[in-house]
Image (cartoon, coloured by chain):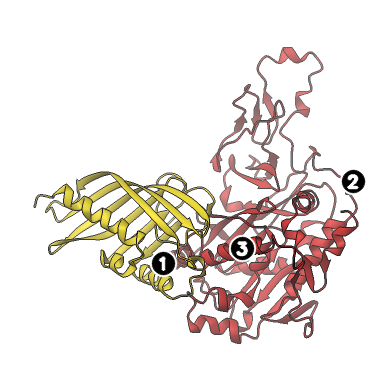
Chain colours: A red, B yellow
């Protein structure tokens, strides 16, 4: 397996086992979700001291917690005593988390503050070392909270590369420069590999055909005639249709850009989409709808309505995406053909400023993300292990 | 005007049957011109203007949803899902002083077979019904899925 991993990604093709082999999925959890920066949530979900949100980094259950000093900590949702999760709610506010099993109690910073009958552990009991384990690194850009299970490695800035300015632009649709999310999520699931959503978030090539039932001729024109670009932006995927206009505040699909920040964040139109891999053939997608500040409420409601019509499990657009993800997983069960084609645009892509780019229907952005995948999957074992409990926390500069 | 519960029940069964049989235009005809079709997301009570829903359609979106299903290009409905809906626990409450409107609350269990995948949804449904001439029309259909806060596999059929 070790030597083979790199060979699964060719410049023009990806091997089917990348989507179907459970052993590769296990390695992805370790080498991608266990090492790089993973999107965890938006600061508007945990505004006040004591607010929390539960989420995941790969298979790890995580509590994202707003501390009394304004900082954000990401804690492993696992009691240090016998391992039960200590927080059961998706969102909430609490000064502490108490394990229901034996009553171990932790401050929302993770510090262990209560153990029933502690004398039983003897005089050497190191309570201060038995807080909830902390995610070693948490960093925030424009309200987007990311965590990394390694204490050392590229900074979030280095990881985001050029997509940092796209996040900025995504926020600047809001007149205050700050976005928030509507409470609640659209949550979807499909029987297929997580990387189908990674690809599909920046795939203008499919829109005309897969979504023909929904998009009008007018909207399809944007895809068929835009002189936009697909971009390999530091290993993240971008489709840039800003030649037809900036991101429209009402969320309609003309103009703007889509960006997939590898491995689990998709920004497009009004959405913050988070990818949660469950297994090699099961994936969950959580979508926040972005609310703008200082705009007429009708505009925000329009954003909400177009999202609800097109996306989510019953969305007229997204239902077909979910369907095709499952059909792909089904088709790839066959080893008769081993490779998936990723060659569109190889004959015409070129540097556009700093980045390799090609025309709208090409696959330069996908090749960039699979190069990123290969890099992470074949990197030597990191010396920092995920279990590092000595974490930092980060001041949110809001 | 006194309401015959049996008539309302038959109306609700018919609404379910029209969906089971893919008679979408007849289904649309059951709704008022300003109808709302709502599937809240999340647990508990929600405000559709302030919180994310799974679906919040006005009549306009409902018509577009139906047009898509009939377009021949709704890939997730090729082949169409087959569904059975069990409508039960019907409770009626007068909602208008003049007796021209009422609210019907039901429990609905939906069995859906999409290609080889079998899904079961349980929901509390709330229909706001208005009398139009001699018929009832649906002014609002709210479907609160038991799993409204879970990650749901695709629901490419009407609920």
Give the camera-side residue of A59 and B95: A59
Q: Is residue A379 left or right of residue A364?
A: right
Q: Residue at x 75, y 79 (%)?
A: A357
Query: Distance from label 1 to label 2 (Cα)?
Result: 52 Å
The reply to whether residue A397 is visible in this rendering is no
Label 2 close to label 3 by CB (< 8 Å)? no
* Chain for numbered disc 2: A
* Chain for numbered disc 3: A
In the rendered view, tell whether residue B111 sits above or below residue A305: above
* Chain for numbered disc 1: A
Q: Residue furthest front?
A: A336
In the rendered view, tell whether residue A305 sits above or below residue B51: below
Task: Name the residue tied to disc 1.
Answer: A298
Query: Distance from label 2 to label 3 (Cα)?
Result: 36 Å
Q: Is residue A330 left or right of residue A136?
A: left
Estimate how packed mark 3 is, as few (under 14), some (14 to 19) or many (20 or more) residues with alpha carbons within 10 Å.
many
Quadrant occupied by the N terminus of chain A: bottom right
Lower position in the chain sequence, tag 2 or tag 3: 3
Task: Name the residue tied to disc 2.
Answer: A383
Quadrant occupied by the C terminus of chain A: bottom right
Lower position in the chain sequence, tag 1 or tag 3: 1
Identify the secondary structure beneath mark 1: helix
Task: Name the residue tied to disc 3.
Answer: A325
């Amino acid at each position: 397996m070790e030597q083979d991993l790199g060979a699964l990604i060719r410049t023009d093709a990806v091997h089917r086992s990348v989507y179907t082999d459970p052993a590769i999925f296990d390695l992805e959890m370790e080498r991608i979700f266990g090492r790089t920066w993973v999107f965890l949530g938006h600061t508007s979900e945990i505004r006040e001291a004591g607010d929390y949100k539960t989420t995941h980094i790969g298979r790890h259950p995580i509590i994202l917690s707003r501390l009394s000093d304004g900082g954000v900590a990401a804690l492993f949702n696992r009691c240090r005593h016998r391992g039960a999760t200590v927080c059961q709610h998706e969102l909430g506010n609490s000064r502490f988390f108490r394990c229901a099993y034996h009553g171990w109690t932790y401050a929302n910073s993770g510090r262990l503050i209560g153990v029933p009958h502690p004398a039983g552990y003897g005089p050497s009991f190191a309570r201060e070392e038995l807080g909830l384990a902390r995610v070693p690194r948490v960093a925030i850009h424009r309200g987007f909270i990311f965590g990394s299970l390694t204490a050392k490695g590229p900074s979030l800035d280095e990881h985001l590369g050029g997509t940092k300015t796209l996040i900025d632009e995504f926020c600047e649709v809001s007149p205050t420069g700050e976005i928030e999310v509507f409470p609640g999520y659209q949550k979807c699931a499909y029987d297929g590999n997580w990387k189908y959503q990674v690809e599909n978030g920046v795939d203008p090539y499919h829109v005309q055909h897969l979504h023909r039932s929904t998009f009008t001729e007018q909207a399809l024109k944007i895809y068929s005639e835009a002189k936009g670009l697909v971009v390999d932006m530091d290993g993240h995927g971008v489709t840039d249709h800003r030649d037809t206009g900036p991101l429209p505040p009402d969320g309609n699909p003309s103009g703007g850009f889509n960006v997939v920040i590898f491995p689990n964040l998709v920004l497009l139109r009004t959405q913050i989409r988070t990818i949660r891999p469950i297994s090699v053939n099961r994936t969950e997608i959580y979508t926040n709808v972005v609310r703008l500040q200082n705009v007429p409420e009708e505009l925000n409601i329009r954003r909400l309505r177009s999202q609800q019509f097109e996306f989510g499990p019953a969305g007229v657009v997204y239902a077909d995406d979910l369907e095709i993800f499952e059909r792909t997983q089904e088709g790839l069960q066959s080893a008769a053909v081993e490779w998936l084609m990723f060659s569109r645009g190889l004959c015409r892509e070129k540097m556009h400023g700093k980045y390799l780019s090609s025309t709208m229907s090409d696959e330069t952005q996908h090749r960039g993300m699979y190069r990123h995948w290969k890099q992470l999957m074949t990197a030597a074992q990191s010396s920092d292990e995920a279990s590092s409990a000595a974490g930092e926390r980060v001041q949110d500069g809001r | 005007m006194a309401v015959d519960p049996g008539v309302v029940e038959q109306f609700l069964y018919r609404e379910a049957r029209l969906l089971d049989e893919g008679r979408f235009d007849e289904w649309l005809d059951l709704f008022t011109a300003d109808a709302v079709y709502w599937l809240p997301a999340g647990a508990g009570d929600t405000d559709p203007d302030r919180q994310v829903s799974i679906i919040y359609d006005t009549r306009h979106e409902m018509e577009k949803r139906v047009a898509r299903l009939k377009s021949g290009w709704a890939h997730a409905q090729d082949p169409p899902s087959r569904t059975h809906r069990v409508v039960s626990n019907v409770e009626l409450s007068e909602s208008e002083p003049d007796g021209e409107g009422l609210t019907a609350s039901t429990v609905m269990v939906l069995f859906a077979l999409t290609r080889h995948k079998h899904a079961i949804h349980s929901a509390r449904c709330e229909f706001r019904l208005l009398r139009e001439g001699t018929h009832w029309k649906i002014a609002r259909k709210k479907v609160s899925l038991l799993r409204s806060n879970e990650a749901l596999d695709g629901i490419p059929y009407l609920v």
